[in-house]
Image (tube, helix red, strand yellow):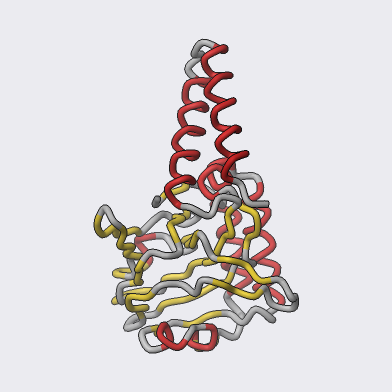
């Protein structure tokens, strides 16, 4: 399931985060890549030890906590602290699949990467190219969103970032270990939750909505891994 989530960050929040990141010392992105990914990865990243990057990461996490669409789509159990990358002209990231397990820096905790997320910080008109391309069973999806918008998709998907040919593309990226490991089950729950919210807003019969809500929670109770 690929879900586009609008306005995760406000325009002011995007401006603030980018201002904090700008003076950072951007390093070769291959430093955090696995063996296969490093062969096709050409971008820059801020090191996780960078104080400004940690502050920006905390800001993104706070925004995610208050976003109901993110919670509904991913059912997060653990969220990897967001990282930040930059693509200048000529940079790209070829086809790859994200590592199945990540260790959270400075801890002994490991996270299973069920869902990948890209939060766009650069506006589409600031750069050419740089589309995130995700391949799944339903075809190939090209994603280039407004600054502050985010896309989430199964971490098991083959994906890439097309070469940037003009300007600079900046984004936050991270992974989520979901309470529901299976993407098909998460999709059913997301669609059911979305339908419940739509029916509630339209003033549908309360008893029907309650029964649907009960089905949602009973399915979540059956599938959740806590």
Name the residue: 58% across, 71% down.
Answer: 83
Given residues 162 and 21, the one toward you in this image is: 162
Name the residue: 51% across, 33% down.
Answer: 193
Name the residue: 46% across, 55% down.
Answer: 152
Give the farthest residue toward the front.
Answer: 222
Give the farthest residue toward the left.
Answer: 139
Name the residue: 40% across, 72% down.
Answer: 97
In the image, is residue 52 above or below residue 150? below
> Residue 167: percent from the left, percent from the top?
37, 74
> Residue 40: percent from the left, percent from the top?
36, 84
Q: Is residue 10 visible?
A: no
Q: Is residue 101 visible?
A: yes
> Residue 14: percent from the left, percent from the top?
56, 58
The image quadrant of residue 143 is bottom left
> Residue 187: percent from the left, percent from the top?
44, 44
The image quadrant of residue 67 is top right
Whether residue 147 sits left or right of residue 24 in the image: it is: left
In the image, is residue 190 above or below residue 182? above
In the image, is residue 193 above or below residue 181? above
């Amino acid at each position: 399931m690929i879900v586009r989530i609008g306005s995760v960050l406000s325009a002011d929040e995007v401006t603030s985060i980018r201002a904090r990141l700008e003076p950072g010392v951007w390093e070769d992105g291959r430093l955090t890549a696995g063996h296969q990914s490093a062969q096709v990865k050409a971008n820059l990243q801020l090191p996780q030890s960078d104080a400004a990057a940690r502050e920006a990461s905390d800001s993104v996490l706070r925004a995610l906590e208050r976003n109901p669409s993110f919670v509904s789509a991913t059912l997060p159990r653990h969220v990897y602290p967001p990282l930040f990358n930059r693509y200048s002209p000529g940079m790209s990231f070829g086809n790859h699949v994200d590592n199945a397990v990540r260790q959270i820096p400075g801890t002994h905790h490991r996270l299973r990467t069920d869902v990948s997320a890209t939060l766009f910080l650069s506006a589409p008109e600031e750069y050419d190219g740089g589309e995130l391309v995700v391949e799944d069973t339903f075809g190939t999806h090209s994603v280039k969103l407004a600054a502050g918008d985010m896309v989430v998709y199964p971490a098991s998907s083959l994906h890439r970032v097309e070469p940037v040919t003009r300007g600079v593309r900046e984004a936050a990226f991270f992974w989520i270990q979901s309470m529901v490991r299976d993407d098909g089950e998460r999709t059913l729950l997301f669609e059911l939750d979305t339908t419940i919210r739509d029916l509630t807003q339209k003033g549908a019969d309360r008893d029907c909505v309650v029964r649907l809500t009960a089905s949602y929670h009973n399915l979540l109770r059956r599938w959740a891994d806590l």
